[in-house]
Image: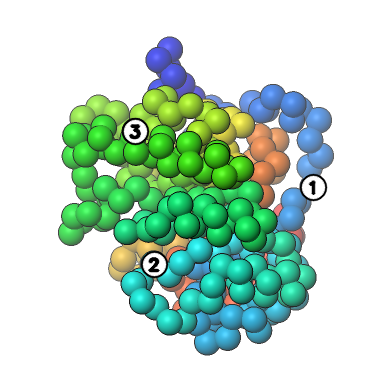
Amino acid sequence: MTDPAGHLRAPQCLGRRSLLLGGGAALLLPGQAAAKRRTSTLGLADTTVRKELARDYASTLRAVAAMGYGLFGFRLASYVANDPSEPTPQDKARMVRDAGMAVGVVRLGVRGADYDRQFDQAAAIGANIVALTTAPIFIASRTLGQTTRAALDAYIPQLAALGEKAKAAGLTLAYHNHWYDLMPIDGDRPLDLMASRIAPDLLSFEVDLAWTWYAGVAPLDLLAALGPRVVSMHLKDIDRNHGTAITDHAVTPGSGEMGYAALMPRIARLTRVTGYVEVDNPEDGLAAARAAMAYLRGR
């Protein structure tokens, strides 16, 4: 929720039930009171099947479409410099449509990206939403998510300028949160500052439910607080006993601690935006995508 200054507030009670329900559980976004309780089209984020895509992009997309996914979100360029395995955005969009899916949220590069070029590419392939996976300041040090308040304050105007460029290209810029975006820096959470300092027409949000939960924030509260600025969601679960790295704790919806069976109906009351299954580091990406689809379609 928000305080009088417009900042998002973390829930005070961090028990499992309060994290699940949150203060936003009984709220409806404007114009959504009559939304039907049905499962929306599900999307898949390319990270889930990145190993399979590297081997055969087109056949992987066909397998994903056969599972029932209607949208596929993908990066506009590799996150690793000079990666020869990445098809062009145009080829990716063609293969997505050939497989019977629609182009979903596309993702900007983070380090050294040519944003002007990537906005042009996104518009050319018919994308509507471009997501920034994280702010460069959060990957500049040896510790992921660690930055200074000075660096954050200096970056926010740059993010606003990026939103201006996206808007000029006819696109919506969405910032994707991680857990560290909801951890205070000198008293303020980065996501709060982005939301309060950047106009809604320049910055929207892609809410990652699991990373929100991991930060100790109720996903429903964050969705309610951001309201219509939420244009996309990432769906995954958290299992802190799975693997050792934080990204290893990301598992398929319904196989962790978040209580998706109760969470999803409440989300449907708050927003109708598309949810994209994203499992950060699965052993078998296609198996993870299949399990997620089976679980979510059964809700």
- Among numbered discs 1 and 3, the one appearing first in the sequence: 1
Residues at marks 2 and 1, CA–CA distance in whole angstroms: 35 Å
Residue 79, which numbered label? 2
| Position of 185 relative to 258 (above/below) | above
The label nearer to you, 2 versus 3, is 3
Element carrying mark 3: helix
* Quadrant of the image occupied by residue 13: top left
| Amino acid tagged 2 | Tyr
The label nearer to you, 1 versus 3, is 3
Residue at 43%, 29% in the rendered image: 198
Q: Residues within 10 Å of mark 1 (few under 14, many from 20)?
A: few
- The answer to which of 237 and 67 lies nearer the viewer is 67
Check disc 1 and report the residue beneath it. Answer: 38
Residues at marks 2 and 3, CA–CA distance in whole angstroms: 24 Å
Element carrying mark 2: loop
| Amino acid tagged 1 | Arg
Q: Residues within 10 Å of mark 3 (few under 14, many from 20)?
A: some
Check disc 3 and report the residue beneath it. Answer: 157
Residue at 81%, 30% in the rendered image: 34
